[in-house]
Each structure stands twice: as structure tokens, then as C-alpha cells.
Amino acid sequence: MLGFPEAQAVEDLADLLYDFLPGSGNNRTAFPLAAAQAGVGDLWVPGSKRPAIVQLLTATLERRRHLFTKLIMSIVRQAMTYRRGKGNPLTRAEVERLNSLLPGVSFKIPELLDRAFLESLSGTSEVRREPQSGPLSVERSKVLASLLIEIGRLNPQERGLRFEGFLSELFCAFELAPRGSFRLVGEQIDGSFRLDGQTYLVEAKWHGPQIGFADLMTFSGKVGGKASWSRGLFVSNSGFTAEGLEAFARGRQTNLICVDGLDLYEVLDGRVSLTDVLRHKDRRAAETNRAFVPVRDLNLRRA
């Protein structure tokens, strides 16, 4: 099993590599084809793209570490072809970012450090795209809604983990650079994402009693114990108690915003954009110190 530093590096690599190749869809350039060329094709698990990338990188490091360089080189070579064909060539900034992350898993690849190679790459494109500001497409909404319905059919032990995965897919759909759950000494964080230059830590709860004051305070303490610029998003499918929210707002500055199941429904139904929801909740929290304002009270323009 990878240690914590390597696991964190894999998450960062997955964020970067996400736009290098498609997860499937053609016979020349895709992550499973790159994996097969490197001799680790059986380690690619079809399904959601980002978790599959994390699984591929992790399994290669754990089980066939001697093929990790070959895998990265195969991904980069195919990305050069794929991205050029899409009119968005691989950039020097992306490869230099890759070079800066590889030491985190104890690798350095001389071919990617070659000056002539780096100078041959485009230097104008940005590594990250702007978050999607519009509602989800009908097709993406249906896929995510199906995932949420599927979670409801699982046993209680599986629901929490799958709900975290659903949120990661939702954040990916809005290009919020999500990172999966990670464990620090003595505590679990269910994930994180970035919006408008801010990092949000995530707490995710599926079904059960509505979230009250104690749970809000516990998560607020986790966020408060991190960097001063960290913020928190508490997602509770079953919602929050009015008493807990009132007590939480009394006498302290909130470092959280909250989303419930009805808010998720509005996003999945294509009525509003998740990025708009988060931005407006942020603003309301700044203006009123209320961690939770329902989407229906934000006066967002419906699509």
C-alpha cells in the first residue's frame, strides 16, 4: 500500500493527467490503450475516468513499479497526438508540472526533462480550464442522477463511500479539480475541490438523521485546523436541523457552507449550475454568517 505522501502525489498526478487523454472512445489514443502499450492494461478499471486514473497509477506503483516510467511515457506520447488533433496541443507548462510531481512517487524521467523536447511544446495554453458556469448537459445529468439512485439501493456500509465518489464525479463535471478522500493523523477528510482560487474541504453524509450542531462543529474544527485560506463544504443528503444551524451561527464566524439533497436535485435537474450555487452560498455566508441557505432562497436564475 502506498504511503500518505505517495498517495497524495498520485491524486495530484490524476488531476493533471485527466485532460491528457479520454477514458475511452477511440482506437488510437485513450488511457486504456496507453496502459496496454505499457504492459499494465489489465490494471485499467473501466468506469468513472478520474477514479480509474488514480487506480491505474496506484496499482502500477504497487504491483509493477518497474513499468511506471513506461506508463507515463505512453500517456504523454498519446496525449501529444490526441491533444494536437483536438486543436489544444500539450503544453510545456503541463509537462513541467508533471516533472515537478513525479519525484513525489520517487521518479524522474530524463526524456521529459530534455530541454529540446520542452522547447518544442506550446507555452501559451493554461494547465487548468475555468470551471463550467452553466448547468449540466442533459446526458451528464442523467448519468449523475442514475449514480445517485444506485447509491440509494446499496447497503448502509457502502453508501457513504459511493456518495463520496458521486460528489467527486459531480465536481469533475463542473471542472472543480476534485481530490478524493484522504486520511490525516486522527481524522478523515472526504475530499476537496477548488473554486475561484479557493480550496474547499468536503464532508459528505448520505442518509441518517439530519445534521445538527455537533457534526457542524466537528467539521468546522477540521477546517479551522488547516491553512487559514481553507473553507469547508458540508454535503448532507438528508439535510440539517434548524436548531443546529441556528446554534452554529451564534457567536462564531462560519468557515463552512452547506448543501442538502434538494440542492443537489436542483443541480442534477439542470435548473442551476453548481458553481453558481457555491458562489451564491459563499456570498450569503459572508453577508449573514448562515452556513446553509437553500438553493430555492438564493434567487438564482433557472435555466
Image (spheres, grey):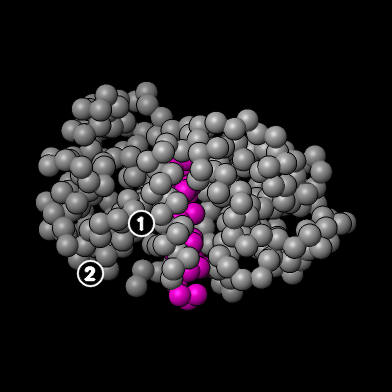
| Residue 126 position by quadrant | top left
Closest to the observer: 145 or 93?
145
Q: CA distance from mark 2 to mark 1?
A: 18 Å
Where does the C terminus fall, quadrant-wise?
top right
Residue 284, can we see it? yes
Q: Residues within 10 Å of mark 1 (few under 14, many from 20)?
A: some
Closest to the observer: 265 or 131?
265
Which of the two labelled residues, at mark 2 and mark 1, occupies the earlier sequence position?
1
Specify start and end residues of the magenta stretch as a single range: 155-183
Secondary element under disc 1, as helix, strand or loop, is helix
| Residue 97 position by quadrant | top left
Closest to the observer: 260 or 118?
260
What residue do we see at 66% from left, 53% from top? 258
Is label 2 in contact with label 1 (beta carbons under 8 Å)? no
Above or below: residue 84 compared with residue 103: above
Magenta-colored stretch includes residue 164: yes
35 with respect to 272 (left or right): left
| Residue 103 position by quadrant | bottom left
Above or below: residue 234 compared with residue 121: below
Q: Position of residue 240 (x, y in %)?
A: 70, 61
Above or below: residue 157 compared with residue 85: below
What residue do we see at 46% from left, 57% from top? 148
Closest to the observer: 149 or 168?
149
The amino acid at mark 1 is: Pro
Q: Position of residue 64 (x, y in %)?
A: 20, 66
Disc 1: which residue: 51
The amino acid at mark 2 is: Arg
92 with respect to 282 (left or right): left
Disc 2: which residue: 63
By secondary structure, the bulk of the magenta-drawn segment is best described as helix
Magenta-colored stretch includes residue 259: no
